[in-house]
């Protein structure tokens, strides 16, 4: 019988309420994603899926740091978490204690968060307020070269923020769509 020692608040049906399972899942995510992640990125991935609440995720991370299963390192000039060899091996050995759907949902959410963070680092969006509207400029750069710079005028900051969010979710789609339209594919 699994011992429930985590809070149920904020957890959807099928979520984790056992701290050992939460720690295994965190190690599994870090091992699967293969890039260091910020603490808040891991917590966001677990919360967005409804698998773990904020407090249990942070408590599990603290325990993993304390026992050396996870370590903190500077990556992109900020503290990020990585799984140690022991933590990665433990997660792989114990991964069968977690349901495949739980593992897959958590890893997919983590990968989306990591991809979004990369997109935010590599692409710039500038919102400029005007008297009765806003300009939003999307910049896609590669190796110091500007591939695309597009400025749109929109009604307000709210609309600009929505466009910014959509762009940062998949900047390549905007670039591809514009190229396709210009050469007549779509």
Image (cartoon, rainbow, N blue to C red):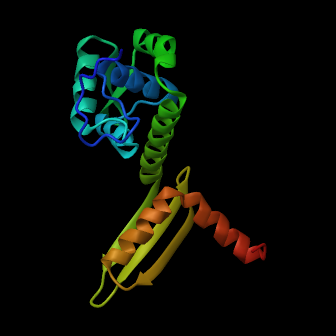
* Viewer-side residue, 100 vs 134: 100
x then y, percent, for residue 135:
39, 80
| Quarter placement of the N terminus | top left
> Looking at the image, is 59 positioned above or below residue 176?
above
> Looking at the image, is 24 positioned above or below residue 158?
above
User: Can the viewer see residue 145?
Assistant: no
Point 42% across, 63% down: residue: 165
> Looking at the image, is 9 positioned above or below residue 22?
below
Residue 61, picture quadrant: top left
x then y, percent, for residue 44:
34, 42
| Quarter placement of the C terminus | bottom right
* Viewer-side residue, 129 vs 147: 129
x then y, percent, for residue 182:
72, 76
Residue extending furthest bottom?
132
Horizontal side of 69 relative to 90 (left or right) equals: left
User: Can the viewer see residue 128?
Assistant: yes
The image shows a total of numbered marks equal to 0
Point 46% across, 30% down: residue: 35
Residue extending furthest front?
1
x then y, percent, for residue 160:
38, 74
Residue 125, picture quadrant: bottom left
* Viewer-side residue, 22 vs 2: 2
Residue 17, picture quadrant: top left
Point 34% across, 25% down: residue: 22
């Amino acid at each position: 019988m699994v011992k429930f020692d985590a809070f149920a608040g904020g957890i959807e049906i099928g979520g984790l309420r056992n701290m050992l399972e939460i720690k295994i899942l965190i190690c599994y995510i870090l091992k699967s994603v293969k890039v260091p992640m910020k603490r808040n990125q891991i917590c966001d991935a677990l919360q967005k899926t409804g698998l773990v609440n904020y407090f249990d995720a942070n408590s599990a991370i603290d325990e993993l740091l304390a026992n050396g299963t996870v370590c903190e390192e500077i990556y992109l000039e900020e503290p990020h978490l990585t799984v140690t060899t022991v933590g990665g091996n433990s997660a792989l050995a114990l991964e069968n204690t977690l349901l495949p759907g739980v593992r897959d949902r958590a890893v997919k959410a983590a990968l989306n968060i990591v991809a979004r963070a990369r997109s935010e680092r590599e692409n710039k969006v500038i919102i400029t307020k005007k008297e009765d509207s806003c300009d939003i400029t999307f910049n896609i750069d590669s190796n110091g070269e500007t591939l695309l710079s597009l400025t749109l005028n929109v009604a307000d900051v709210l609309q600009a923020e929505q466009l910014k969010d959509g762009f940062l979710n998949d900047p390549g789609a905007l670039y591809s769509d514009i190229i396709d339209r210009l050469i007549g594919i779509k």
